[in-house]
Amino acid sequence: MTAGQWTALILAAGRGPNDPMAKAYGVTNKCVIAIAAVPMLRRVADALRQAPSVSRIVISIEDAALVELAGPGVQAIAPSSSAPASVIAAVTSGAVTYPVLITTGDHALLTPSMVEHFCAAAETSGADFCAGLARAETILAAYPQSIRTFFTLGPDRVSGCNLFALRNANGLKLLERWQYLEQVRKKPWRLVAAFGIAPLIGFLTGSLTLDKAFAIISRRLGLIARPVIMPFAEAAIDVDKPADKDLAESILAARRPAP
């Protein structure tokens, strides 16, 4: 893999006053919440800074002053109305250049190893767009107490990892479609139904596999989209609620070397 090739875009816009984390901790943007004494946003930025494949870090956030929490060498840009719209705006304005690694400001357990694995797989995939996924057995074997949203596709049960690769302008077609599906992202059957009755029947009967699903998306949108299976259970654990914070802190405590 070519070192320093990727621009990293962190989506860190607040979700408003009803965000359960913001409400629980009395903040306007959950990315400022400290996980094991370090703000989430700083943890994400540090992981990206330490990944050899990443050359630039851009943060999409509504309050540019919060970017100081991320540490040095980052750039702030204003978000748009949704996560997909923010990515599209960042690319079309020239704020980020291809290839783009997209992640979120609440990915507090992100590590350089995860970033390198994902970027290397995306580069060799030949795809325009890649999405990071972790299998249920990988996650639950390590953290059976973790509550995740799993998509069942044939024999595969997978969860999203908040890692996406946008390798060229053709990949924007998926993000343009995703804007209209954002509200149903936690409802697998509605996501599948958006691509036609045949995929929906396949999903409901258990015959729609992970590879078939990505093949249908690719064919319908005129691009190449592929999954990247992440072997890291922590890659699928973001911090959406207080229980996630507790889990993340216990994982980070276990990572620390003994004194």
Image: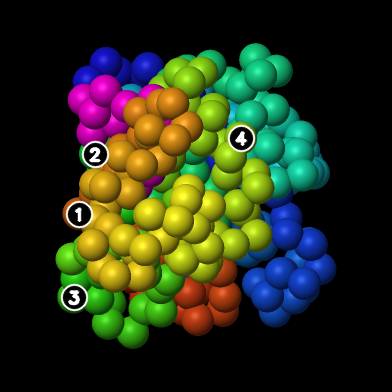
Task: Please indicate whether residue 115 sits to the left or right of residue 35 in the image.
Answer: left
Span of residues in magenta: 119-132
Q: Secondary structure at mark 2?
A: helix
Q: Disc 3 marks which amino acid?
A: Ala
Q: Earlier in the sequence, mark 1 or mark 4?
A: 4
Residue at 50%, 81% (x, y): give it.
243
Residue that numbered label 4 is attached to: 176
Pointer 3: what residue? Answer: 141
User: Quick check: 211 left or right of 171?
Assistant: left
The location of residue 148, given as percent across then percent down, is: 41, 73
Label located before the other in sequence (4 or 3)? 3
The answer to which of marks 2 and 1 sits earlier in the sequence is 2
- Residue 117 - label: 2
Residue at image x 27%, y 16%? 2
| Count of numbered circles on the image | 4
- Residue receiving disc 1: 231
- Where residue 208 appears, as percent x and y from the top left, is 28, 58
The span from disc 2 to disc 1 (Cα, nearest Å) is 9 Å
- Whether residue 123 appears in magenta in the rendering, the answer is yes
19 is higher (above) or lower (below) than 77: below
Q: Nearer the viewer, residue 14 or 200?
A: 200
N-term mark: 2 or 3: 2
Please tell me whether mark 3 sits on a helix, a strand or a loop. helix
Label 2 with label 1: CB-CB less than 8 Å: yes
